[in-house]
Image (cartoon, rainbow, N blue to C red):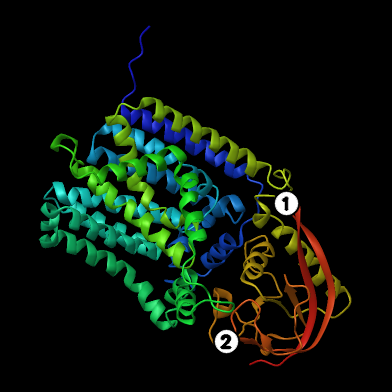
Amino acid sequence: MRFDRPTPLTLLAVVLGGLLLVRLAALALNGTDLFFDEAQYWHWSTTPAFGYYSKPPLIAWLIGASTAVCGTSEFCVRLPSPILHTGTALAVAWLGTRAYDARVGALAGIAYALLPGVSVSAGIISTDVPLLLAWTLALVALTALFTTHAWWPALLLGLAIGMGLNAKYAMAWFAMCLAIYLVMTPERRSILRDGRLWAGVALGLALLAPNLIWNASNGFATFAHTADNAKWGAAASGASSGGGATGLTFGNPGKAAEFFFAQFGVFGPFYFAGLLVIAWRATRTRLPDDQRMAQADRLLLAFSLPLIIVITLQAFVSRAHANWAAPAYVAATVLVIATLVRDVSWGWLRASYALHAALLAVIIAATATAGRIALPGGADPFARTLGWRALADATRAELAAAKAAGRPYRAIVTDDRSLSATLLYYLRDGTGHERAPPVLAWRCGARPMDHFEMTRPYVKAAGEPVLLVSLRAPPVTQTAIPSAKKDDRATCPAFAVSQTLSQRDLPAGTGKRRVTFVSVSGYRGG
């Protein structure tokens, strides 16, 4: 009996459907607690708004939609991630089909879904997840603007830009990549005279407008945080002071190298090496015409390599996380797969699929057994995502003891964003709402430095006594001191009376996390 070879679309649907089921099962078996960023996004979702302190609002809206249907468990908070990544894989296939053909599109969609970075990201909820879908759809729309006279690409481009900017401001890199492409490709510059392009941009900015209005009414908190996160101010300060013993040295080649080599893990060693080879080939301007870079290759290279270079420079100037160049790998995936198909490098393609599938299996096994297996040397890769539930349980015990003694606490005060977020999540009641007493932030200085200091700072009117929960041992509470978690500009208002109740080493995977509980009263702040 003969079986016909499946069509590219059938192959894509079967593989992506299977991967989605595997990832949903892995999410159900995931043994990690919510990381405090995830817990913070969940808390945002309980108060819908057009903006939040550190990010635009889309991540909160997605979690809110998921938890409204599914509940507030870790599984439900993270549920949008594998679903959206599957959608992005389909969009990558669409991009590959438009740029090359259906075979390249299907293989690229599968390759994207198996990327190591995607396999990690599909098990958490982060702002990169909707950003990558928006970036891919915007690229599809751009290719259609170049090749059709229809208006649907303008609508898609506007929706994608608006979605991307409301997910993460990194969507703005799309404009930089387009500018570089047009510099490289003079024959495409007529797009700048195409009203559809500007209609799409206008729609995207209109969709961002509510967030801009929110920022204007909240001291442009998100923009200030973005600059703080990149540490541009610190780098400039270090450069102007000349570095030295007290200044920050301008230029950190170690951080740049760390970011660059991390991309072999994010994108996969075969694919990232392949991208570097493609970039090297592109510099060989004396190639004969039949070996020069194809139009589609040039577009995809412009939307990948410059972003990696810019973020590497950012790491050199101050710092950069490994995922900051994630949008580059949308175009890079299609480009590398198209090149492998064109060069008939099926062995490398099969090897990359096999390696990434094996890494997916390792990631699933590791998250399912999180906290029970340590790496050689005792390190636990999940230490930062474990122990938060135990910390909330210990806090709950302190509250119960005080209540039993007839002196219940009127508020819980934290001195760190991670504690605020995780206590709000893990102290919630069965309906997902906050239990009494409220969790408030010990704010230092006039300017809030995180979402909780902005929206729920502790004030004396909240009542006393207060249970202070701190990851510092012991926290200073009875004098106005330079804030240990902020900078030298800020001082923390003091409490007149403080009594350290206990210091506990709580389990955090195979390691420990020390938490200090302090009873405080006599707040001297505003």
Residue 104 picture quarter: top left
In x, y percent, where is residue 470?
73, 73
Q: Is residue 16 above or below residue 404?
A: above
Does residue 469 appear to the left or right of 321 in the view shown?
A: right
Quadrant position of the C terminus in the picture: bottom right
Neighbour tally class for label 1: few under 14, some 14-19, many 20 plus, Cα within 10 Å: many
Real-space Cα separation, disc 2 to disc 1, in angstroms: 36 Å
- Any mark on residue 489, and which? 2
Residue 277 picture quarter: top left
Q: Is residue 301 above or below residue 488?
A: above
Residue 410 picture quarter: bottom right
Does residue 31 appear to the left or right of 336 in the view shown?
A: right
Neighbour tally class for label 2: few under 14, some 14-19, many 20 plus, Cα within 10 Å: few
Q: Which residue type carries mark 1?
A: Gly
- Any mark on residue 20, and which? none
Name the residue carrying label 1: 509
Residue 105 visible in rendering: no
Quadrant position of the N terminus in the picture: top left
Whichever of callouts 2 and 1 sits on the residue coming sooner in the sequence is: 2
In x, y percent, where is residue 385?
65, 55
Viewer-nearest residue: 466 or 494: 494
Q: Residue at x 46, y 67 (%)?
A: 251
Residue 494 visible in rendering: yes
In x, y percent, where is residue 261?
48, 49
Viewer-nearest residue: 365 or 337: 337
